[in-house]
Amino acid sequence: MTTEQMTGQEGRTIYRRPLLLSNPTSYCPGCGHGIVHRLVAEVLEELEIGGKTILVGSVGCSVFAYDFLALDSVESPHGRAAAVATGVKRYKPDKVVFTYQGDGDLAAIGTAEIIHAAARGERFTTIFVNNGIYGMTGGQMAPTTLPGQRTTSSPRGRDVETQGYPLPVTEMLSLLPGVQYAARVSVGDAGLVGKAKQAIKRAFEVQLENRGFSIVEVLSTCPVGWGMTPTDAMTRLRGAVMDAYPVGTFVDRPRRIAPNLPQPGASHRSITEGF
Amino acid sequence: MFRPVLVAIERCKGCGLCVDACAPGAIALDMVHVNAMGHHPAVLVDPDACTSCAKCARMCPDAALSIFARPRGA
Amino acid sequence: MTVVDRPATARPRIVASPPGTGGVAHPLDRVLMKGNEAIAEAAVAAGCDAYFGYPITPQAELLEWMARRMPEEGRVFVQAESELAAINMALGAAAAGARVLVSSSSPGMSLMAEAMSYMAGSQLPVVVVNVQRGGPGLGSIGAAQGDYFQATKGHGHGDYRVPVLAPSSIAEAIDLVRDSFILAERYRTPVILLADGILGQAMEPVAPTFRTLEKSTPDWTLDGAENRTPRVVKSLHLRPEDLEQHDLELQAVYAEIEATEQRWAGEQLDEAEVVLVAYGTAARVARTAVERLRDEGIKAGLFRPITLWPFPSQPLREVATGAKAVMAVEMSAGQMVEDVRLAIEGAVPVFHHGRTGGMVPSPDGVVDAVKQAIGMRGEARR
């Protein structure tokens, strides 16, 4: 479809919505899921693999991802996506398989499954959207909630004495040899979104090279759960959240990066290797 | 008239992230009208200031923005 | 419905060599195979594409057989990190169109309960073998039948049913593995093959030929939406009106299964005055008890359900008409007996005899229980 057909006006198209994005999403205004869905759709289109991709969904706000991405999809029970994806990819190794999971699905109930899939070097990709909260169920604490952060199940702020410390998922998984690519990115501003897209693209490329497990942890926002406007939520993401979870490429074994773990609290502007 | 940004008004949820992303301030929320979902959609208020950098489109969670390069003389 | 009499008593020649290695020219030739391994090989022969499992006694040999055989055949084998992971791998593989087998024992089946519900709701064909052991909890590793409730009425949440096949010998188990795949794919449902630790661990003579099973590619499986509308395998139907519609469609499938797939076998049921009802290993004990009762002049017979769901209620009611007593013999404290009572609907007194915890009833124990039951009704017997 030419630009003129689409818009009725001349001019080179700089950006248009990817065709793999089907229906308008039901996510809250300003929710990072919308950005990540869009990036995945853009990447699959650019790599021309949408037609052979199978989405392994999960449970959380993104349970409806199969309504928004025009892909063959299978629903997983909560936390089991990495096991379901193992079954799909082992049987159909020539297809592109990815899981799309939130912090409850992956870092709470699904921790065993993701660790073992990564340890086995399963050849699928995981898109892990970390917004530090359980949005779908009303804004409860997640394993990735920051200390002191108020949620509906930590109303006085997360108390590390009784509620423990956040899980650094990508750092943990980076220790496993089966992990071929592990990166943490953010959607905090347009520049970060651009880097996030590069990481997502690299993760799928690693799968296409049939080398092993790839994961991109995307730091995101939950404006409603955090009790903020989308704008303020992005500010918090660029500040406190990225301070606690440094972004960067931790593992890229085909490019001999492994593991390269920044210290928590490191300036997020200093990690650019691998991008 | 050439417009560097087209907004899919019915997909826009008025989140304002495009407004934040736009350095020249070419895009804003239309606080007068609402779309069918009840949101104030984004609107290109200053087309001449737009450089087609597409940062707004990059931030948009709803892929509601399409960006076009300005043809010569437009 | 199938009514099968005991096979003729020609003595088979037993050859102790693995299948496919020759030396079994005579049609009555048999090989000795362990139940777990026979079930596994039957699945391999029937074209099982993928096996996922986790070690648990008393079915670890099934996993180990598959660990060797599936890679030999170029098929998928994964020892998962838990039964929970294994059954979810099966869910994924089935969604992608694989013919899938999972095996476990009672505690592992509990871990699979959630996925059973999801697979039923998503209409995924998966065959799950439960080699039962004593329970509840960690229980014992002895053979038991304490998972009858779980298999026929329990496991996961929601409005669904799952066909359950119960072999009583290793030879029958081989046939029922293949039949399980057929049922699973014909009706797009999980199917449970309910065995027990004795069937799994014993070695019996079996015919060395394992039948193959053709496979087609249904139009709902996932393989990438190139040039077509995307397919979604899911169980979520958020609007109650939609979910009710979906549930009623499932109920229609179950109604068809109930109408057409019941199986049972009967022995010496003509004019039987005492009907023993038993499945699996308990049926073999009951068979011996029937012979001993007949030797003492008590006209006993054996009704052996092969499908536990759908339970052959109508045939049982017909068989029991005119009998003095019906007795369920189980390796449990009394689970199938409830379905027996429902089937009999009060027409004939129903009794239960069982051992639990991994203990096996003895034929004499059954004989004594039957005599006591009849004695309770005031009938004098020699």
Image (cartoon, grey):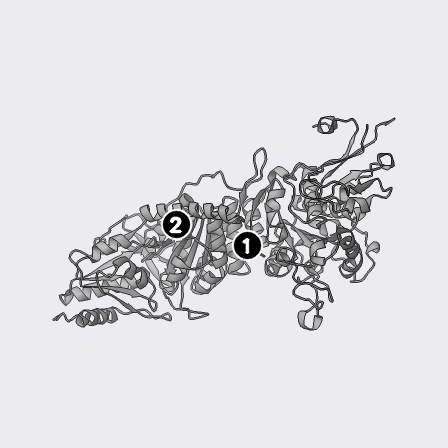
Describe the element under mark 2 as helix, strand or loop. helix
Task: Answer yes or no: are tags 2 and 1 on the same subunit.
Answer: no
Residue A30 horizontal/vertical position (percent): 72, 49
C267 vs C333, nearest the viewer: C333
For image coordinates 71% across by 29% down, the residue present is A6
User: Can residue C31 be seen from the camera position used here?
Assistant: no
What label does residue C67 carry, if any?
none
Describe the element under mark 1 as helix, strand or loop. loop
C305 vs B40, nearest the viewer: B40
Q: Amino acid at mark 1?
A: Pro
Residue C176 horizontal/vertical position (percent): 36, 51
C139 vs A20, nearest the viewer: A20
What is the chain identity of the residue bearing mark 2? Answer: C
Q: Residue under circle 2?
A: C180
Q: Residue under circle 1?
A: A77
Q: Quadrant of residue C381?
A: bottom left
Left or right position of A118 against C133 = right
For image coordinates 27% across by 64% down, the residue present is C328
- Count neighbours of disc 2 (C-alpha within 10 A) and say few if under 14, some if 14 to 19, many if 20 or more: many
Q: Amino acid at mark 2?
A: Ser
